[in-house]
Image: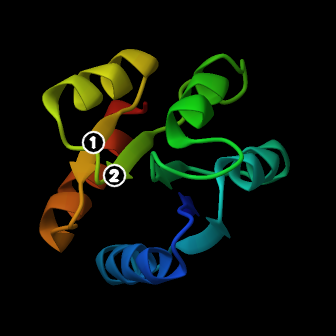
């Protein structure tokens, strides 16, 4: 499985990478420090799942999911938003934009693992 982690914090990217590596040992990780780099990677790599922060420079996570859902090749790509934005209206906005699931920071490893499994099972 190929997973793209879009997160502007190098520390948080390491945390997420560690959680994913432990839960899914045969996973290849791709990392992006902002949504624009993530979008560029999605154009050239075969990615099976996106884990993205909302608050990033260049292109935020909400803009990224909207771009993905409007792209014919990527529109069904599983996408889990991982963000500090945990207010009900934020989560609703992200779901309306097309995220498969939403995980509020600080990350609980088992919760993230389950959200990943659910997103992959849904196929979006």
Task: Locate residue 11, reporting x and y percent.
Answer: 45, 83
Q: Quadrant of the N terminus?
A: bottom right
N-term-proximal mark, 1 vs 2: 2
Is mark 1 in CB contact (under 8 Å) with mark 2? yes
Find residue 44 and name its label.
Answer: none
Q: Out of 121 and 105, give the one closest to the viewer.
A: 105
> Is residue 39 left or right of 13 when viewed as pictured?
right
Task: Locate residue 50, reporting x and y percent.
Answer: 52, 50
Rendered position, 27 above or below 46: below
Q: Which residue is mark 1?
A: 102
Task: Locate residue 14, reporting x and y percent.
Answer: 46, 83
Neighbourhood count class around disc 1 (C-alpha, 10 Å): few under 14, some 14–19, many 20 upward: many
Q: Residue at x 15, y 60 (%)?
A: 111
Q: Quadrant of the C terminus?
A: top left
Q: Nearer the viewer, mark 1 or mark 2?
A: 2
Rendered position, 112 above or below 97: below
Q: Residue at x 65, y 65 (%)?
A: 33
Q: Residue at x 65, y 56 (%)?
A: 34
Residue 118 visible somewhere in the drawing? no
CA gap between label 1 and label 2 equals 8 Å
Rendered position, 104 above or below 11: above
> Is residue 16 left or right of 105 when viewed as pictured?
right
- Assign a secondary structure to mark 1: strand
Neighbourhood count class around disc 2 (C-alpha, 10 Å): few under 14, some 14–19, many 20 upward: many
> Is residue 84 left or right of 2 when viewed as pictured?
left
Q: Which residue is mark 2?
A: 83
- Assign a secondary structure to mark 2: strand
Residue 87 visible somewhere in the drawing? yes
Q: Out of 92 and 101, give the one closest to the viewer.
A: 92
């Amino acid at each position: 499985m190929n997973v793209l982690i879009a997160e502007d914090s190098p520390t948080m990217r390491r945390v997420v990478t560690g959680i994913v590596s432990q839960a899914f040992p045969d996973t290849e990780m791709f990392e992006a420090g902002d949504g624009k780099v993530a979008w560029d990677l999605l154009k050239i790599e075969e990615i099976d799942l996106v884990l993205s922060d909302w608050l990033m420079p260049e292109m935020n996570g909400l803009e990224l999911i909207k771009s993905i859902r409007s792209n014919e090749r990527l529109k069904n790509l599983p996408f889990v938003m991982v963000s500090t934005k945990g207010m009900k209206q934020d989560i609703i906005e992200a779901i309306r934009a097309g995220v498969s699931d939403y995980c509020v920071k600080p990350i609980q490893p088992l919760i993230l693992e389950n959200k990943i499994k659910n997103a992959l099972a849904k196929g979006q």
